[in-house]
Amino acid sequence: MTYLLLGYEFFKAGLFAVGGGLATLPFLIQMSYNHPQWFSVDELMQMVAISESTPGAIGINMATYVGFHVAGLLGAVVATLSVALPPFLIILIVVHILDRFKESRRINGGLEALRPAVTGLIGAAGYLVLRSSLFTVQGVEAPFQWIVLALFLSLLGLLQIKPLARIHPIVYIAAGAVLGVVLRL
């Protein structure tokens, strides 16, 4: 039953999370509320951090991570295939339709109308990550986390220095992971 539920939840996320991997975050947060035995919001934020720092699309990485966390290897396969199947099918249909109507002003206008919705979904995901980072400690509501804001602003300042801006992002990701462990963020 867990596999069917994982498949359903991630199929739904893959179907409606328009705009890329971070657009799946609201669906994952809803999953944590609907299935608290799977993972907490705090665990989800840790999964996001790990998924962001590993190669590949974050939506696929998150599905794989959550599926494995919930139901092992088979759960990872079910969740990954379920989140990838809807976009794959939609792309096949859209390519077929757009090829026939690529000069249509209505189709092009409809695609343009999707941009604000995608921007909103990504903005909502960013807000949820920001709120969780600044106002929770190990899944519990906490006072404003000044150290997290200070670290973020420090990194942003460092990236304004030309030689430091040329350093590969993986170095910053690794440094952030080490700093997070050391400071227990």
Image (cartoon, helix red, strand yellow):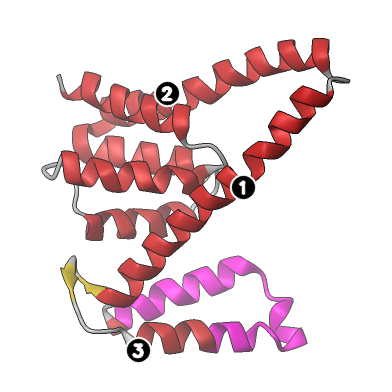
Q: Residue furthest right?
A: 103
Q: Is residue 67 left or right of residue 14?
A: left
In the rendered structure, find residue 146 and report the number of the disc placed on it. Answer: 3
- Residue 167: x percent and y percent? 68, 75
Instruction: Please tell me whether mark 1 sits on a helix, a strand or a loop.
Output: helix
Which of the pair 98/66 is nearer the observer?
Answer: 98
Which of the pair 84/69 is nearer the observer?
Answer: 84
Q: Is residue 68 left or right of residue 105?
A: left
User: Closer to the N terminus: mark 1 or mark 3?
Assistant: 1
For badge 1, the amino acid type reads Pro
Task: Say if 91 sits above or below 134 in the image.
Answer: above
User: Closer to the N terminus: mark 2 or mark 3?
Assistant: 2
- Residue 117: x percent and y percent? 56, 44
Question: Mark 1 or mark 3, which is nearer to you?
Answer: 1
Q: Main secondary structure of the magenta part?
A: helix
Magenta residue span: 154-182
